Image (cartoon, helix red, strand yellow):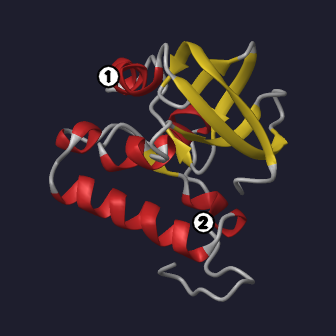
Amino acid sequence: MPSGAQRIAGKVTSVHDGDTITVNGESIRLGSIDAPELAQAYGSQSRDHLSALVLGQQVTVTYAEKDQYDRVLGTVFTPDCSNVNLSQVASGAAWYYEAYKCEIDIQLRMAYATAQTTAKASSRGLWAAPAMAPWVFRNGVDAKVPASCPNGDGPSG
């Protein structure tokens, strides 16, 4: 989920769940993360955390593509340049979606991995009583994580 060269700037008018918002009438799926579904444990708390960060606020979304549901797949930034996607992971409100790690640069991969490790070690958010990963909840199987990426990292990156 690369940030991409395309941009949307505007006010967040709704927060659907912990990884989907609406900006300027456009549905935005936060890339590189996966939040619990609303029907899952910690789903409503994840949505509420994202709402507290962005609802009614001006944001900038950078993106390169849309997903299979025609949602913009992007990275959301607040006016102070905070990465909202990363904030969701750091607070324990979402998982780093490692199955798509090869679509982002290695520095961002490392930031997401570190944020998740720290949240988990601190029992923050969903890590206090770990919920089932949303991709398992939706599909019944674990996501396939690439062992390495063509841009130079190994199994840990």
Answer with mark 1 or mark 2, whichever residue precedes in sequence: 1
* Crowd band around label 1 with a 10 angstrom C-alpha radius: few (<14), some (14–19), many (20+): some
| Image location (x, y in percent) of residue 139 | 62, 37
Q: Is residue 70 above or below residue 51?
A: below
| Image location (x, y in percent) of residue 128 | 17, 41
Residue named by callout 1: 45
To which quarter of the image does residue 73 belong? top right
Hey, which residue is sitting farthest front in the picture? 80
**What's under tag 2, amino acid-wise?**
Val
Asked whether 10 or 74 is in front, the reply is 10
Between the residue at mark 1 and the residue at mark 2, the CA separation in whole angstroms equals 26 Å
Q: Secondary structure at mark 1?
A: helix
Residue named by callout 2: 145
**Nearest to viewer (mark 1 / mark 2):** 1
Q: Secondary structure at mark 2?
A: loop
**What's under tag 1, amino acid-wise?**
Gln
Answer with left or right where residue 60 lies relative to residue 109: right
Q: Residue at x 20, y 44 (%)?
A: 124
